[in-house]
Amino acid sequence: MPPLFKDSTASELHAGLAPLGVSLRLARRLQAAVVRRDEFPESLSEVSDKLLARVRREVRLPRLIQRDKAVSARDGFAKYLFQGDGPEPFEAVRIPLVHRSGDEKLIVCVSTQVGCALGCEFCATGRMGFGRNLSTWEMVDQVIRVAADSRHPVRGVVFMGMGEPMLNYEAVVRAARILSEPCGMAISSKSISLSTAGVVPGIRRFTADRLPFRLVVSLVSADPSRRGGLMPVEKAYPLPELMESIWEYHRASRQRVVLAWTMISGFNTREEDAIQLAEMVRGLPITLDLIDVNDATGRFHPPTSDELDTFRDALRKHLKMPVVRRYSGGQDINAGCGMLAGAK
């Protein structure tokens, strides 16, 4: 197989291209040209045209096909529909951060799979079932395509789109490395997040690999039976085992763990839920991300303002940890958290 750009780190490209006479320095320059400008250079200083032509003949530079794009009239979020190596479409979301004049930037929410096998009841992707894993280049190119279509620079990536990243671990981590390496997109590793619904083997591998990226774990409930009713992953990796893996990650990394709490009215926004969570994470430094549920079917609803205020008061009283209210935009174009479904 010819070396595939966007699918390898610079060192991996060098290993594949070294027989052609490509040095590590040249591999990095080629990587920068492809990832930042999405083109193979016609010429490079201090590099012979003959060598560049030889390399060009031996490599592949794949590109996603953009099938559709929708922009929210409410908040400027944009949803892209892409097609890659297979016939199945998948989506990415452009998240604008424009509240600081002169420091406007973007975050790209990247899909890692077509569909998802975990089947979370409140997630449109989970209701699709599993299609296939995306390759590394298909993830990297989501960011490249969005960046090329945007006025502001991409400064963050969240692997929180369609799919469960920990079930496509190697390809996801390689994509994160490419996006963060200096000759790639040069995105700070602290601004790249991998999210999981609680796949314990993936969390333990992430811990063992000592990766610099942020880990986000979705909880929904600290009550195993209630959590298991909406997240079948609870049956495979019960909360006690999940919490043990999170503790292992904290002890190894010394990082504050980010726990995501999808708020569902009447389900997980009671004072009792705050008490259960506080007891479960006692002694563990966490940040709790509160995210409204988004459900186009109408089965699940976000909390009312009063319900949210009561829950936040309970968290301040019992949890006493940082709580962040995350905005989930693009709901009018089905681009909010939990709404991606390949335009179905």
Image (cartoon, helix red, strand yellow):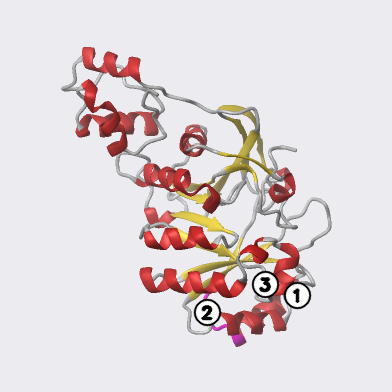
Q: Earlier in the sequence, mark 3 or mark 1?
A: 3
- Measure the alpha-carbon separation of dots 2 and 3: 17 Å
| Residue at the spot 67% in from the left edge and 72% down from the top edge | 221
Residue linked to disc 1: 307
| Residue at the spot 58% in from the left edge and 51% down from the top edge | 164
Q: Earlier in the sequence, mark 2 or mark 3?
A: 3
Residue linked to disc 3: 221
Residue linked to disc 2: 321
- Which span of residues is magenta-colored? 318-322
| Residue at the spot 65% in from the left edge and 78% down from the top edge | 312
Q: Secondary structure at mark 2?
A: loop
- Left/right of residue 128 with respect to residue 64 in the rendered view: right
- Measure the alpha-carbon separation of dots 3 and 1: 16 Å
Question: What's under tag 1, amino acid-wise?
Answer: Glu
Q: Secondary structure at mark 1?
A: helix
What is the quadrant of residue 295 in the picture? bottom right
Label 3 or label 1, whichever lies nearer to me, is 3
Residue 321 included in the magenta stretch of the image: yes
Tell me where residue 286 appears, x and y as whole percent.
50, 74
Number of residues whose C-alpha sits closer than 10 Å to that of mark 3, classed few (under 14), some (14–19) or many (20 or more): many
- Left/right of residue 178 with respect to residue 280 in the rendered view: left
- Measure the alpha-carbon separation of dots 1 and 2: 19 Å
Tell me where residue 151 appears, x and y as whole percent.
49, 37
Give the position of the N terminus as an image quadrant: top left
